[in-house]
Amino acid sequence: MKAGGVEYVILGALSWGPRSGYEIKQLVDKSTRFFWAASYGQIYPELRRLEAAGLVAGAADPQGGRRRTRYSLTPAGRERLCAWLLEPSAGYELRDEGLLKLFFSRALEPGEELEVLRALRADRENVLEQLRALDRLGVARATPALVLDYGIRKHEWMVEWCREAEQRLAGEAKEVAS
Amino acid sequence: MKAGGVEYVILGALSWGPRSGYEIKQLVDKSTRFFWAASYGQIYPELRRLEAAGLVAGAADPQGGRRRTRYSLTPAGRERLCAWLLEPSAGYELRDEGLLKLFFSRALEPGEELEVLRALRADRENVLEQLRALDRLGVARATPALVLDYGIRKHEWMVEWCREAEQRLAGEAKEVAS
DNA sequence: TGGGGCATGTAAGTAGTTACATGATTGT
DNA sequence: ACAATCATGTAACTACTTACATGCCCCA
């Protein structure tokens, strides 16, 4: 992941057809942001860098008096994307504040520990609801749909794990009390 | 997560007892790195910042002729940690290269799509093995053990999901071929 | 006597977010 | 006329990684 970062999000988005920077950002916010976020501050500069490298081509495509540049993948860009898809991956990076809190929650009173776990579950349920809303829109097909299925089922699993852990923790608390 | 970042990893680590910067880094690499990484370049400066803020206290604790500074939580530091534990969280941030690849793998030939999925599973199996190795060391207790259980079971789930998705994809490929 | 682990640090670079600025269009 | 949305951008900032530098100790 070192070099690039946002590069492949853009090449991937353009592999579905020409898009403007704005449209790429919308696509990211509706889908990849759950596993790969990107901001305007990355997208616009990167689009120009990729054009200079010959991987994408921009064409003016104004909507009324509103200027717009839509980019499309060049053959070189498609080749780069496919090469990356078949390369070994760098795994994943996760920063999960809820898990970090659970990890250190021994510092609290036993009852409060349970609160941390409940808050973790609420977080997961919240994301799960967002993913289900995306699913109801029913836009995704093929591998994007596969990834959405992964997200929904994973969050269902996480919510269920939290529930079980809550019962375990609550049970231990009772034992200690008795 | 804006302000701080590494702050709570340090406060949390010190809530288990006094530690040097080096020891904190070891703890991070053996445990929290799966959901919250930190480098020396963050830890040492942050330790001095936290000391200046009165949240931790450093004491010289040399090992032979080898100098060492061990830090411990001050009451103010413990208070800060507990306040954070009970605060609402900012959720999680994930950058998962394997999922991103799967998401865009339609750009490949159908057979190659399956390769991307298999590579994703291999990645997850690899992390799962790391987590199981940690489990075999049997160091974790209480909430840290809970989090390790979460990690192992989640990765088991993810590996299983990949297996099923591989079969689904392989099945579709056959249908198209017939 | 030399490699590996302990221990502390920093400089330089990269990546990413945030907040702002601009201006046109569409719908109410 | 106003708000919302389309559309493009940038400057300043913060966070984080990487690679390096130093030096000591222990053990084979």
Image (spheres, coloured by chain):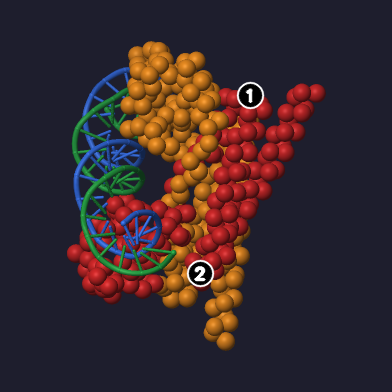
Chain colours: A orange, B red, C blue, D green
Q: Is residue A14 visible?
A: no
Q: Earlier in the sequence, mark 2 or mark 1?
A: 1
Q: Kindly indicate whether the residue at mark 1 contacts the one at mark 2 (C-beta within 8 angstroms).
A: no
Q: Is residue B134 above or below residue A144?
A: below
* Element assignment for label 2: loop
Check residue B109 in the rendering and tell me which mark sits there, or answer none: 1
Q: Secondary structure at mark 1?
A: loop
Q: Which residue is mark 2?
A: B139
Give the position of the C terminus of chain B as an image quadrant.
Answer: top right
The chain ID associated with circle 1 is B
Q: Chain of mark 2?
A: B
x, y percent for residue A167: 60, 70
Q: Please name whichever residue, A112 or B21, is drawn nearer the observer in this view of the structure.
A: B21
* Image: B110 above or below A134: above
Determine the residue positioned at 45% across, 47% down. A93
* Residues at marks 2 and 1 on the same chain: yes
Tell me which residue sits at (68%, 43%) in the image: B163
The residue sitting at the right extreme is: B178
Q: For marks 2 and 1, give the one nearer the viewer.
A: 2
Q: Quadrant of residue A140?
A: top right
Q: Is residue A78 visible?
A: yes
Which residue shows up at 35% across the image and 23% down it? Answer: A49
Q: Residue at x 51, y 48 (%)?
A: A127
Q: CA distance from mark 2 to mark 1?
A: 46 Å
User: Could you classify mark 2 by the number of other residues whose Cα lies within 10 Å: few (under 14), some (14-19), or many (20 or more)?
Assistant: few
